[in-house]
Image (cartoon, grey):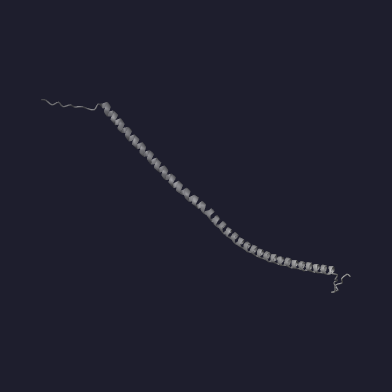
Amino acid sequence: MSSTTVTSSIPPTVAASKATVATSKIAVRTSSVTSSMATSVTKSSMTIFYAATKTTVASSMTTPDSSVSTSDSSVTTLDSSMTTADSSVASSVATATISTASSVATVATSKATVATFKATVTTDGLRIRLGETATTTNRTCAS
């Protein structure tokens, strides 16, 4: 029995194709890395810009906040003014209540006076009907 050795060699065309594919892969990877780096740089720049913008906005917000604080103190002043107004109203109501009570008392006195006057008129009428006069106390009866 004899052994046979088979020797094969890669054809030049196939070798060239493999080299081309390898070069293409390197180019794709380089492109990918470059693209990734560009994205990274852009993100970094945007982050810095965003941070700066936030700082600017924050400093801008501080001014309105101080204005609001001033407004708050103004509102407090208004509140104290309202308290004064409330106490004035309370005094006015108290005065009005006293005036009303006084008026009610006056009306009551007037009613009492009228009642007394009515009683007097009724008594006088009875006297006149009985034949009495204001100066006499004796009745004069008709015969």
Above-or-below relation of 67 to 128: above
Q: In the image, residue 71 lies at what x, y percent? A: 57, 56
Query: Where residue 65 sits: x, y (%)?
Result: 53, 54
Residue 90 appears left or right of 139: left
Question: Which residue is outermost to the front?
Answer: 143
For the residue pair 140 and 49, the one nearer the viewer reads as 140
What residue is shown at x 72% (from left), y 67% (from top)? 108
Where's residue 75, x and y in %? 58, 58
Q: Is residue 95 left or right of residue 119?
A: left
> Which residue is at the far left?
1
- Residue at position x 27%, y 27% in the image: 14
User: Quadrant location of residue 98?
Assistant: bottom right
Tell which of 72 and 111 is nearer to you: 111
Q: Quadrant of the N terminus?
A: top left
The tally of labels here is 0
User: Which quadrant of the view contains residue 44?
Assistant: top left
Q: Quadrant of the C terminus?
A: bottom right
Q: Where is residue 115 drawn, in percent x and y?
A: 76, 67
Q: Residue at x 55, y 55 (%)?
A: 68
